[in-house]
């Protein structure tokens, strides 16, 4: 019998009021490994969660921020203690290899400790008053109830990027994780709740964090349009992001969107070729290409193109596909059948519509045990040009489109020539070219001599253009999203002082 998991609402584990459920399966061994069943929640469950979060907000906002930070410190400690088992289970439900799921948990630990310390900062600003005997202060206050809708590709890191800063700022949360990774989300919520109880003791407040499993179409939509949810933080596709922005924005909710990418790595003719090769293998095929920061375009200087492709094919050929919890595996499966179909659809577009040259892969991987999961061969296209669909649209799978450039300006123009702007990278030994690239690349993140993936928890994370709506996660920047500014004027002159009037 598969284990049955529940929602967490107002401090209690509960079934959905619909009593319906969905299955969570291992994408590397679909038919044999059923991980569990999770509630298919509905609008009533969302309502219950929002009511609980609204009531909890009254009390949680009054817990001193350093104490809220203490909760996150204990959360980080618990995640560290259970890092290996959380990672194992994450690989089982999501597919990426164990080294990467350990990295995913570590990113959550880093975010927890950062948030814990932020509880003792949450700095405001003071400014002089234009009047005598008057003091001007400004400080951060929490917003209220947040809705958090997260993807499956970073089942731990991305929820922590959102929930931890939101909580330390004094907000309460309704959390809907992706249906493909509900188990990691459940583990995270258990850990946070245990830490709340340990740190707050008799001051424990039920309803600060609520978990509602289910689909985007029902649960996500109900959250987005709920009048008692004050803000939404979402990571996922541009299509869904636009919908959230329209619905939530129409109600004047604050919305943070982290959406698609079509990230490129430039390799100039003076680059360290072996290093650039290491990077593209990691950037394009790590997480089976299912990162918003994945390298999906490689822009090669024409002088090195043929040699680079030769070496790249030899290196890709050595990558081992398999179940990510097994030793020596480099690439796991796609997360689901739908995802694999989408990858294959783009490969066919590359071949038939775009007339690019398929030089490696381009098919399902079905040899031996691979037939049990949603495996796809790492795939490389050359002779790709700027406006082909495989050079413009996010694929979210192990597919690399290779373009050629003639010089730095050309490379940057190609890199900038998509609607997206999340991550980017340039390999060069020429310091002037490196700085020009840093200045002119249109992206939220640029790596010099590094892969397009590898963002650190204490740095701003997010993109420009259609990748988002201007907010950043990570580091200090995310604290602007989760707080309102309160300006305070304290007049100790003993008389009415009219600003702009009595002093001019
Ligand atoms: C994502 O792909 O959605 O830089 C997040 C990286 C990771 C985070 C990726 N630290 O690739």
Image (spheres, grey):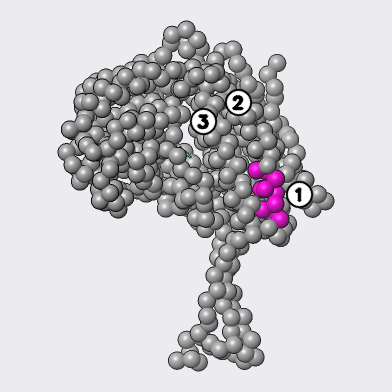
Quadrant where the N terminus lies?
top right
Q: Give the class, few, some or many, for how many residues have Cα within 10 Å of label 2's Cα (few <14, many ≥20).
A: some
Q: Which residues are magenta?
A: 67-76
Q: Is 68 displayed left or right of 332 in the figure?
A: right
Q: Which residue is mark 3?
A: 100
Whole-percent x, y for residue 178 in the image: 55, 33
> CA gap, disc 3 to disc 2?
10 Å
- Location of residue 60 with respect to 158 vertically, above or below: below
Whole-percent x, y for residue 290 in the image: 44, 30
Determine the secondary structure under disc 1: helix
* Mark toward the start of the polypeptide (3 vs 2): 2
Outermost residue on the right side: it is 202
- Location of residue 487 with respect to 168 vertically, above or below: below
Does ligand 1 reach within 8 Å of label 3's beta carbon? Answer: no
Whole-percent x, y for residue 385 in the image: 21, 32
Q: Which residue is mark 2?
A: 88
Whole-percent x, y for residue 324 in the image: 52, 21
Q: Is residue 72 magenta?
A: yes
- Location of residue 385 with respect to 159 vertically, above or below: above
Q: Which residue is mark 1?
A: 199
Q: Which residue is painted at 57% across and 67% down in the image?
A: 124
């Amino acid at each position: 019998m598969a284990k049955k998991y529940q929602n967490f609402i107002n401090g209690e584990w509960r079934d959905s009021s619909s009593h319906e459920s969905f299955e969570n399966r291992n994408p590397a061994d679909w038919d044999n490994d059923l991980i569990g069943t999770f509630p298919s929640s509905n609008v009533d469950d969302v309502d219950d969660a929002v009511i609980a979060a609204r009531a909890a907000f009254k009390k949680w906002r009054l817990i001193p921020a350093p104490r809220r930070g203490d909760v996150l410190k204990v959360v980080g400690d618990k995640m560290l203690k259970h890092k290996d088992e959380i990672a194992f289970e994450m690989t089982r439900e999501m597919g990426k290899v164990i080294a990467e799921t350990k990295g995913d948990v570590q990113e959550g630990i880093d975010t927890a400790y950062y948030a814990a310390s932020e509880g003792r900062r949450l700095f405001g600003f003071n400014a002089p008053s234009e009047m005598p005997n008057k003091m001007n202060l400004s400080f951060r206050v929490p917003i209220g109830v947040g809705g958090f809708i997260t993807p499956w590709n970073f089942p731990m890191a991305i929820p922590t990027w959102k929930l931890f800063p939101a909580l330390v700022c004094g907000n309460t949360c309704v959390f809907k994780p992706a249906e493909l990774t509900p188990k990691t989300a459940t583990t995270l919520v258990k850990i946070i709740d245990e830490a709340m109880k340990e740190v707050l003791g008799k001051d424990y407040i039920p309803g600060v964090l609520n978990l509602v499993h289910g689909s985007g179409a029902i649960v996500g939509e109900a959250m987005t349009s709920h009048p008692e949810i004050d803000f939404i933080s979402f990571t996922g596709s541009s299509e869904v992001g636009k919908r959230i922005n329209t619905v939530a924005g129409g109600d004047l909710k604050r919305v943070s969107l982290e959406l698609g990418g079509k990230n490129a790595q430039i390799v100039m003719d003076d680059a360290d070729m072996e290093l650039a090769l290491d990077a593209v293998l990691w950037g394009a095929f790590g997480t089976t290409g299912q990162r918003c920061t994945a390298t999906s375009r490689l822009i090669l200087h024409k002088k090195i193109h043929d040699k680079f492709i030769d070496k790249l094919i030899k290196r890709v050929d050595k990558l081992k596909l398999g179940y990510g919890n097994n030793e020596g595996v480099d690439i796991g499966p796609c997360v689901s059948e739908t995802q694999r179909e989408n990858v294959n659809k783009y490969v066919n577009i590359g071949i038939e519509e775009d007339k690019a040259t398929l030089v490696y892969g381009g098919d399902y991987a079905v040899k031996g045990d691979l037939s049990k999961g949603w495996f796809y061969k790492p795939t490389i296209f050359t002779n790709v040009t700027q406006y082909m669909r495989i050079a413009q649209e996010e694929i979210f799978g192990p597919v690399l489109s290779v373009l050629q450039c003639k010089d730095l300006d050309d490379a940057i123009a190609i890199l900038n020539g998509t609607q997206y702007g999340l991550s980017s990278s340039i390999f060069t030994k020429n310091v002037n070219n490196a700085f020009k690239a840093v200045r002119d690349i249109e992206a939220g993140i640029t790596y010099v001599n590094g892969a397009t993936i590898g963002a650190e928890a204490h740095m701003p994370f997010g993109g420009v253009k259609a990748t988002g709506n201007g907010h950043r996660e990570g580091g200090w920047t995310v604290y602007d999203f989760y707080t309102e500014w309160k300006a305070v004027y304290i007049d100790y002159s003993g008389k009415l002082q009219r600003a702009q009037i009595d002093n001019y």
